[in-house]
Amino acid sequence: MSVAPAENYASESASDKLGEKPPRRSVGGAGVVLVIPEKREGFLKRTLVNWSQKLRPLLESFAFRVTLVACLIFALFGGGLFVVLDVPDDPGIPILDTLMTIVMVLFILEMIINGIVDYKTYPLSFFFWMDALGTVSMIFEISTLLGSGGKMQTAAGSVDAMLIRTARAAKVGARVGRLSKLMKCISYYLKDKDKKMDLSGKNPAEAKKLSGRLMMTLSTKVSLLTILLVLAIPLFSIGQYPEQDLSMLVWIAKLEREYKRGYDEIVASSGSVNTTMVFKDAVAEMIDFYNPATANYFPYKMKGFPEQVSINSTSANILGEALLEARLAPTQMADVYRISVPACQVDRPECPAHLYFNFHNPRRIEVAQDMAMAFCIILLMILVSANLNQTLHKLVVQPMESMLSVVKDNASQLLKQFGLEDDMDTAEEDVEETELLEGIFKKFARLASLAAGRNEATAEELAGMDESARGVMMEMMNVQVSPAVAAPEPNSSSLRTSAVSGAQTGSEGPESPVAVVTAVEMPDVPVIASLPVSRDVIESWDMDVLALDSDAQTKVAIHIFFDSTLGKITGRSWSEALTFKRFHQVVKAGYNDLPYHNYAHACDVLHTVYRLLCLTSAKTWLNSVDVYALLVAALCHDIGHQGRTNPFLVELCDDLALRYNDKSPLENMHCAKLFEIAAKEETDVFKQMDKETKKQARRVCIAAILHTDNVNHFEMVREISKIYEMASDLCDTQARTADFMPQYLEQVMQKNSLQWLELFLHFADVSNPLKPFPICKKWAWRVLDEFFEQGDEEKRLSLPVGMLNDREKINRPGSQHGFIQFLVAPLVHGTVKIFPDLHPVYSQMAENLGEWKKLWVEECNPSEEDIAKKEADVAKIKDQALELAARVG
């Protein structure tokens, strides 16, 4: 459909409701770091995001990184150093256990912090499992857990030290890979671009070719790394004690046999021999076998081979055990290797017997080679990571940079065509490039959809609507009928680019130098001493202007200009109360006695504009001149209205249509009348301004009033939608932030200040559906009464009767359904996306739409199919209302 329906402005995804509306916003302090737009989070995710922001500086701090590097080095080499330096078990073991425990705790803490800071990618990732493996391996370094420190080695089993240190080296290798940022190879911000690589020729790199080249290169390098590790790691076992050495088992078995032979020799002598040298000769032979010149480990003690034994109640000696007493014992218990007799051949209390070996030298060689192996693995990983980084840079990064550069240049050109600034250079550096591309293309897709929208509909599209909806589209919004298939037309330019309103207001917030003009000093006493309603009512949406008489309406209007929160900094600054009262009296008299476009409507629109300015804290991003000018424009926006529409005047060739060349004749007339009244000295409400300030106020009044013509409605909806799309991250973040962010004030509010002034007046002019339903219904009936009067005149003049003007055909509640769905809802939805604190009015509109549906059913007795269509429309608007309310944090 060419006409942008309400669904075009719906939120892309539903949000979780976050709570009640925050206090009114005020200018905040430091800016908020922005991220690529993401879906609304639940409580757990918001908590993670909050802690992520708090812990990221710690994780990235130099002190934390140095501490972890020191812990990694100590985890790899600390235990080995204690062995190489031959630190005694007491106090070496307690000190080592304490330090290793601290290291393990820091590793666990690091994993927890990484899991919080990088909660999207770190948990269960490759780096997570490498960290977990390295952390768990620490239990093999702590003697109170599974560590070997202070524990004697036995032939029954021992821990594979190579496996342990390889696991810990893998942890360091993972860190090396992490630091080299291999997982972020598509870096848009790499500065070392290869200028020689030309991708602009006839043979650009395609995704399939890049993938093939990349896989071939990576496969080759991984294969090479595997070969190097397979060949290199076994080299570090050369010189170590051979794990399959069976000599110790052979000797312990032989010693047991020789001990048995000596025992049997004494028994066989029947007491004639009480000392035997058989076992002693075997021990001496063993000592000679483990000569330090040929072996770097040796036995130094034995137990279970007592020299004095009792045989048949007779004392005897089996010498040999004392030969090892002079041998050097190791200083560390872990250097002891104990061999036990499999089965004792002589029954004795000391069984089983043990033989103890001093493995001081082999263990130091083993530890030194393990340390060298770990260092080699780390070095290999560093070199391979650097080489892969360079390869990926050439195969992936450079082509991607070239593509991103082209996309960025083209994007900048498109942004300029939309009249928007290119702010991609200020994007957050942590943003993934793929997310950046995705965000850019999604944004342009939506902008293209907005730009392609036209103020026309095909006959088929209109045929699918009921009579009331067609009336709203064609009569109020001036939608033209086009062929079913039509070529896209150039986007119509808005009044913003016209000669009248093309100039900017010059408003740059309350600090604008234009606003610094000598103002009128008024005593701080109320201009209106007694109000017809309470101030609380005036400061709410419950203000019912139609319930007040003319004098009471006047008091409310003057109160807004002089005694309200905004009036004290606008009306009191730029006008004298007496002059304004005379001006107001003339303006009031200029309104005709019509059902709708009358003085009461002017007061209602004035009050609505005032509420919009207050709820959006306009005084923080508009200067007082703009606020004052907009309030004056609201008061005068329909002065002199004749109760007839612009198309009617054009059809009759009315004097106004001829004077203003059929372009917004009523709105041009309203502007002219305003400044005709202000041209007189006694009613000049701008006379306190200097020349430049007065020009600024005039620009605001003209631009705002001209934009109340519904012909400009679609263009306005597209403009605010484009602004939101280009600043959606700012707007969505602001919705969750209590105070105004400086970026939001500068890039959204002040940058588009004239657009918001135009929007607020048009918004207020069609705001009847946003009021409580009793007030909404009163104004709707008045609008229709005025339409019906025009329809009656059209019949008298034999003119085509407008679809909304025939009192005999139109259904009042049905007409309001189409008015809200097609005209009001898209405008209000786009407005609330930018001004999140206005979301209650959208919720009220959704409730009113449901009420109109009920009245329509009661009056028309429609078919179930028609009811279902209306209910679907109501449900959709209510869902959007919930989404908008949920955005506010």
Image (tube, rainbow, N blue to C red):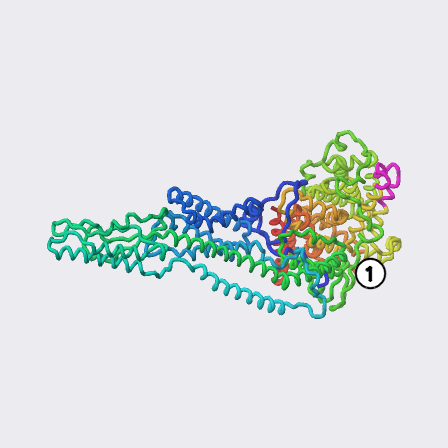
**Residue type beneath disc 1:** Leu
Q: Position of residue 243 (x, y in %)?
A: 36, 60
- Front residue of 692/841: it is 692
> Which class describes the residues within 10 Å of circle 1: few (<14), some (14-19), or many (20+)?
some
Count of all numbered marks drawn on residues in the image: 1
Q: Is residue 305 left or right of residue 459?
A: left
Q: Is residue 119 magenta?
A: no
Q: Is residue 690 magenta?
A: yes
Q: Is residue 681 left or right of residue 719?
A: right
Q: Position of residue 577 (x, y in %)?
A: 81, 34
Q: Position of residue 71 (x, y in %)?
A: 49, 47
Q: Position of residue 570 (x, y in %)?
A: 77, 37
Residue at left offset 22%, top offset 59%: 257
Residue at left offset 12%, top offset 56%: 269
Q: Is residue 217 left or right of residue 477?
A: left
For mark 1, what is the residue?
Answer: 799
- Front residue of 70/691: it is 70
The secondary element bearing badge 1 is classed as loop
> Does residue 476 show up?
no
- Front residue of 347/5: it is 347
> Does residue 766 show up?
yes
The vertical placement of 436 against 63, above or below, is below
The stretch in magenta equals 673-692
Locate the N terminus by quadrant: bottom right
- Front residue of 413/315: it is 315
